Image (cartoon, rainbow, N blue to C red):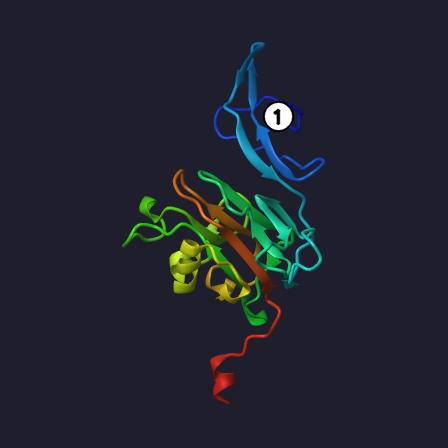
Amino acid sequence: DDVLVATEMDATYGENTFTISPSGDDGLKTTKVVAYLGGTAYPAEETDIFLFNLNDVAESYETHFADGDADFASYGFVVGTSIDLSDEALHSDHPYGDGVELYSYLRSPIEVDANKGNLNYVDIALIEPGEAGSTFGQEAFNDYVVLEASTDGKEWIALGDGYDASLHTEWTDAYTNGNVSSSLFKAHSIKLSDYFGNGQQILLRFRLYSNSSTSGYGWVVDDLSIQTGAVLSTAKFAN
């Protein structure tokens, strides 16, 4: 946004890394790199990046979103209520737009510990269903929501397949008729140690992707808990 944030002197040809620290409010920032050689400027194409400040690393986390959105940095998501849902939750835009990516990042990195339980949340995802027979990752899958994690903030992996309203019959019906209520909430549970080793520190984000065609009501997430309970081994259950 036309503010100098970093310089690199005598840069070599090839890949160079710049560290950009957020200043001011969180947000989507238009960013570009300009190289100079012999007094001539060579600007790169502009790109949008989302900058926000992180909290300290946490071993566990839990929220019912009653205390607002201070723990999250979001673009296209807000914490609040709606006409249809009286309890506070994390809401995408309603309806979400065509050709957009919306995301909400948990500010606290989580240190993975297989002995402290899973990541759990409930949600309503009234997202445009994909074409019949399509699967997540295919263009015909159309819009989707997904929970993602990263160890470096650059490369993100999906914690399970992205999904849309076709995941549950009740969601498909509500996507069609527009009737939204708390009875539509569905539970999810993810074992972080299936994706990362003990001690690894990860960032988490909720992401909604839409293509340029039909959109829908959107996504609502609530009752998020991460590693808040002990996990018993199979042997302990047997005993």
Q: How many marks?
A: 1
Q: Residue 91, percent across and down?
A: 57, 52
Q: Residue furthest bottom?
A: 239
- Judging by the rendered image, the residue that carries numbered circle 1 is 8
Q: Is the residue marked by circle 1 packed among few (<14), some (14-19), or many (20+) residues within 10 Å? A: few
Residue visible at 71% across and 57% down in the picture: 67
Query: Do we see residue 197 in this rendering?
Result: no
Q: Looking at the rendering, in which quadrant would you find the N terminus?
A: top right
Residue visible at 60% across and 65% down in the picture: 225
Query: Do we see residue 52 in this rendering?
Result: yes
Q: Nearer the viewer, residue 218 or 208?
A: 218
Left or right placement of residue 24 versus residue 38 in this view? right
Q: Residue 25, percent across and down?
A: 70, 38
Q: Residue 96, percent across and down?
A: 50, 44
Q: Nearer the viewer, residue 150 or 35?
A: 150
Residue visible at 52% across and 84% down in the picture: 236
Q: Is residue 211 above or below residue 34?
A: below
Q: Which of 141 and 73 is in front in this view?
A: 141
Q: Nearer the viewer, residue 11 or 101?
A: 101
Q: Is residue 122 above or below residue 229?
A: above
Left or right placement of residue 133 versus residue 68 in this view? left
Residue visible at 65% across and 28% down in the picture: 6
Q: Which SS class for mark 1?
A: loop
Q: What residue type is labelled 1?
A: Glu
Q: Residue furthest left?
A: 133
